[in-house]
Image: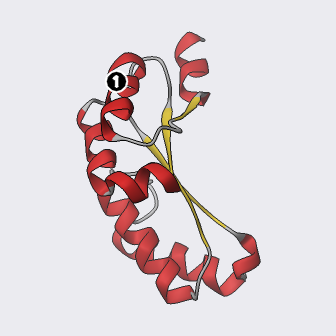
Amino acid sequence: MLESARKRLIFAMDVDNFEDAEKWVKRLHDRVGLFKIGKQLFTRCGPEVVRMVRAEGGEVFLDLKYHDIPNTVAKAGLEACRLGVKMVNVHALGGREMMEKLVAEVDAEYPRGSAGRP
Protein backbone atom coordinates (compact mmCIF):
# COMPACT_ATOMS: atom_id res chain seq x y z
CA MET A 1 0.00 0.00 0.00
CA LEU A 2 2.76 2.46 0.93
CA GLU A 3 4.68 1.68 -2.28
CA SER A 4 1.51 2.27 -4.30
CA ALA A 5 1.03 5.67 -2.66
CA ARG A 6 4.68 6.61 -3.24
CA LYS A 7 4.40 5.90 -6.96
CA ARG A 8 1.49 8.36 -7.25
CA LEU A 9 3.40 11.25 -5.69
CA ILE A 10 4.93 13.85 -8.00
CA PHE A 11 7.31 16.33 -6.41
CA ALA A 12 7.25 19.69 -8.21
CA MET A 13 10.92 20.60 -8.31
CA ASP A 14 10.26 24.32 -8.79
CA VAL A 15 13.78 25.48 -8.04
CA ASP A 16 16.05 27.58 -10.22
CA ASN A 17 19.42 25.85 -9.91
CA PHE A 18 21.06 22.45 -10.13
CA GLU A 19 22.32 22.42 -6.54
CA ASP A 20 18.86 22.87 -5.00
CA ALA A 21 17.41 20.28 -7.37
CA GLU A 22 20.09 17.80 -6.39
CA LYS A 23 19.41 18.37 -2.68
CA TRP A 24 15.72 17.60 -3.15
CA VAL A 25 16.41 14.51 -5.23
CA LYS A 26 18.88 13.11 -2.70
CA ARG A 27 16.37 13.75 0.06
CA LEU A 28 13.24 12.39 -1.63
CA HIS A 29 14.23 9.92 -4.37
CA ASP A 30 12.93 6.95 -2.37
CA ARG A 31 9.79 8.74 -1.21
CA VAL A 32 8.19 10.03 -4.42
CA GLY A 33 7.27 8.47 -7.74
CA LEU A 34 8.31 11.31 -10.04
CA PHE A 35 10.21 14.57 -9.94
CA LYS A 36 8.61 17.29 -12.05
CA ILE A 37 11.15 19.33 -13.97
CA GLY A 38 9.56 22.43 -15.44
CA LYS A 39 10.57 25.06 -17.95
CA GLN A 40 12.61 27.23 -15.58
CA LEU A 41 14.82 24.44 -14.21
CA PHE A 42 15.21 22.72 -17.58
CA THR A 43 16.10 25.98 -19.34
CA ARG A 44 18.69 26.77 -16.68
CA CYS A 45 20.20 23.30 -16.26
CA GLY A 46 19.28 21.42 -19.42
CA PRO A 47 19.32 17.65 -19.84
CA GLU A 48 21.95 17.32 -17.12
CA VAL A 49 19.30 17.79 -14.43
CA VAL A 50 17.29 14.90 -15.91
CA ARG A 51 20.42 12.74 -15.95
CA MET A 52 21.11 13.61 -12.31
CA VAL A 53 17.62 12.58 -11.19
CA ARG A 54 17.91 9.30 -13.10
CA ALA A 55 21.41 8.64 -11.68
CA GLU A 56 20.01 9.04 -8.16
CA GLY A 57 17.31 6.47 -8.89
CA GLY A 58 14.47 8.92 -9.50
CA GLU A 59 11.94 9.14 -12.31
CA VAL A 60 11.18 12.34 -14.24
CA PHE A 61 8.04 14.11 -15.41
CA LEU A 62 9.37 16.64 -17.93
CA ASP A 63 6.79 19.43 -17.73
CA LEU A 64 7.61 21.46 -20.85
CA LYS A 65 4.06 21.62 -22.22
CA TYR A 66 4.98 20.79 -25.81
CA HIS A 67 2.95 22.75 -28.37
CA ASP A 68 4.42 23.33 -31.83
CA ILE A 69 4.24 21.91 -35.33
CA PRO A 70 3.81 18.12 -35.28
CA ASN A 71 7.34 17.22 -36.38
CA THR A 72 8.97 19.50 -33.80
CA VAL A 73 6.88 18.12 -30.94
CA ALA A 74 7.48 14.54 -32.08
CA LYS A 75 11.26 14.97 -32.25
CA ALA A 76 11.44 16.88 -28.95
CA GLY A 77 9.30 14.27 -27.22
CA LEU A 78 11.46 11.47 -28.60
CA GLU A 79 14.59 13.17 -27.27
CA ALA A 80 12.91 13.42 -23.86
CA CYS A 81 12.27 9.68 -24.00
CA ARG A 82 15.89 9.04 -24.90
CA LEU A 83 16.86 10.96 -21.76
CA GLY A 84 14.84 8.42 -19.80
CA VAL A 85 11.93 10.58 -18.72
CA LYS A 86 8.85 8.72 -17.56
CA MET A 87 6.29 11.32 -18.62
CA VAL A 88 5.97 14.45 -20.77
CA ASN A 89 2.97 16.64 -21.41
CA VAL A 90 1.59 18.26 -24.54
CA HIS A 91 -1.07 20.91 -25.09
CA ALA A 92 -4.04 19.34 -26.82
CA LEU A 93 -4.66 22.69 -28.48
CA GLY A 94 -1.73 21.74 -30.74
CA GLY A 95 -4.12 19.33 -32.41
CA ARG A 96 -4.64 15.67 -33.02
CA GLU A 97 -1.95 15.46 -35.72
CA MET A 98 0.67 16.82 -33.31
CA MET A 99 -0.24 14.31 -30.61
CA GLU A 100 -0.46 11.38 -33.02
CA LYS A 101 2.93 12.22 -34.53
CA LEU A 102 4.52 12.22 -31.06
CA VAL A 103 2.97 8.85 -30.20
CA ALA A 104 4.09 7.40 -33.55
CA GLU A 105 7.70 8.53 -33.00
CA VAL A 106 7.79 7.06 -29.51
CA ASP A 107 6.12 3.83 -30.67
CA ALA A 108 8.69 3.41 -33.44
CA GLU A 109 11.64 3.56 -31.04
CA TYR A 110 10.00 2.17 -27.90
CA PRO A 111 7.32 -0.38 -28.84
CA ARG A 112 4.48 -0.69 -26.35
CA GLY A 113 5.43 -3.04 -23.56
CA SER A 114 9.17 -2.72 -24.16
CA ALA A 115 11.67 -1.89 -21.44
CA GLY A 116 12.50 1.78 -21.29
CA ARG A 117 9.22 2.96 -22.74
CA PRO A 118 7.88 5.99 -20.91
| Quadrant containing the N terminus in the rendered view | top right
Q: Is residue 71 left or right of residue 91?
A: left
In the image, residue 108 above or below residue 69: above
Residue farthest to the top? 2
- Residue 103, given in percent of the width and then of the height, sits at 54, 73
Q: How many marks?
A: 1
- Residue 100, given in percent of the width and then of the height, sits at 61, 79
In the image, residue 58 above or below residue 16: above
Structural crowding at the residue carrying mark 1, measured as other residues with C-alpha within 10 Å and reported as few (<14), some (14–19) or many (≥20): few
Q: Give the residue at x 27% y 30%.
A: 56
Q: Is residue 87 visible?
A: no
Q: How are the residues colored?
A: secondary structure
Q: Give the residue at x 30% y 33%.
A: 19
Given the image, on which type of amino acid does mark 1 rest?
Lys
- Residue 49, given in percent of the width and then of the height, sits at 32, 46
Q: Which residue is mark 1?
A: 23
Q: Give the residue at x 33% y 47%.
A: 50
Q: Is residue 15 visible?
A: yes
- Residue 84, given in percent of the width and then of the height, sits at 33, 52
Kind of element beneath mark 1:
helix
